[in-house]
Image (cartoon, helix red, strand yellow):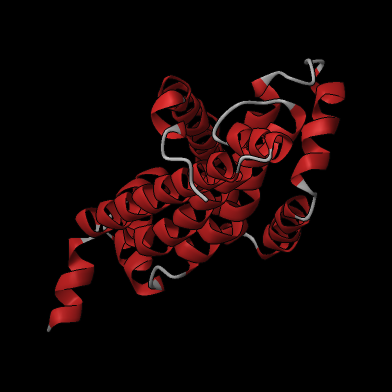
Amino acid sequence: MIDWSWIPANADRLGPAIVQHLLLALVPVLIGLVVAVPVGWLANRSRAARAVLVPAAGLLYTIPSLVLFIVLPGILGTQILDPLNVVVALSVYTVALLVRSVADALAAVPGMVVAAATAMGYKPARRFAQVELPLSLPVLISGLRVATVTNISLVAVGALIGIGGLGYFLTDGFLRGSSTSILVGTVLIFVIALIFDSLLVLVGKLATPWVGAGGSR
């Protein structure tokens, strides 16, 4: 049974927990995107590089999150309760997810368009920024949605080693036998994931208006 009085009684803890959860989830998305774009570009440019980088990224993603949270302090020289461990771990997962997405997104750009841009005098860097990257956005946004929702969910695992965020209410609820705490934490994580997924869909539509226009004809 839900104890509705629990929510106002813990409102002062829910706000900071939501903020911390968002920081721990979204900062790694930004870091991972910055790293994954050049790595994915390299994977798209060379078959040999793709044969190494894409499987390597996939291998990184197979590492259990809890194991990574525990191992990283020894590698980084941080404390076990340092939020940096979660940020680094989720950045690794984001890169692992996005490298293939970036490579596939760039590979989906029509070769004739790239050739036309080259013939018009576009240098590689300018061609990438003004032609290839914009045209790859629909596929890239899809990968970014998966990475973002995954990170928002995985932050909760950090609560098992004492890192805050909304996962705290899940572990605390189990310890205290409070189904309300577990339910509220779970629902908030779900709602936040849904909101940011919807925002990315909207960003994708605004950034690629030609996709909708092409589909309506």
**Quadrant in which the C terminus appears:** bottom left
Front one among 176 and 25: 176
- Please say if 58 is above or below 31: below
What residue is drawn where x is 47% and y is 33%? Answer: 6
- Please say if 215 is above or below 175: below
What residue is drawn where x is 51% and y is 57%? Answer: 146
Q: In this view, does 174 lie to the left or right of 129?
A: right
Front one among 67 and 165: 165
Front one among 38 and 61: 61
Q: In this view, does 213 lie to the left or right of 140?
A: left
Q: Is residue 119 left or right of residue 4?
A: left
- Please say if 117 is above or below 203: below
Q: x, y percentage for residue 3?
A: 48, 41
Q: x, y percentage for residue 174?
A: 70, 41
**How many numbered marks does the figure carry?**
0
Q: Can residue 107 be seen in this view?
A: yes
Q: Quadrant of residue 28?
A: top right
Q: Is residue 38 visible?
A: no
What residue is drawn where x is 66% and y is 22%? Answer: 84
What residue is drawn where x is 30% and y is 60%? Answer: 117
- Please say if 41 is above or below 214: above
Front one among 85 and 131: 85
Q: x, y percentage for residue 30?
A: 48, 36
Q: x, y percentage for residue 176?
A: 69, 34
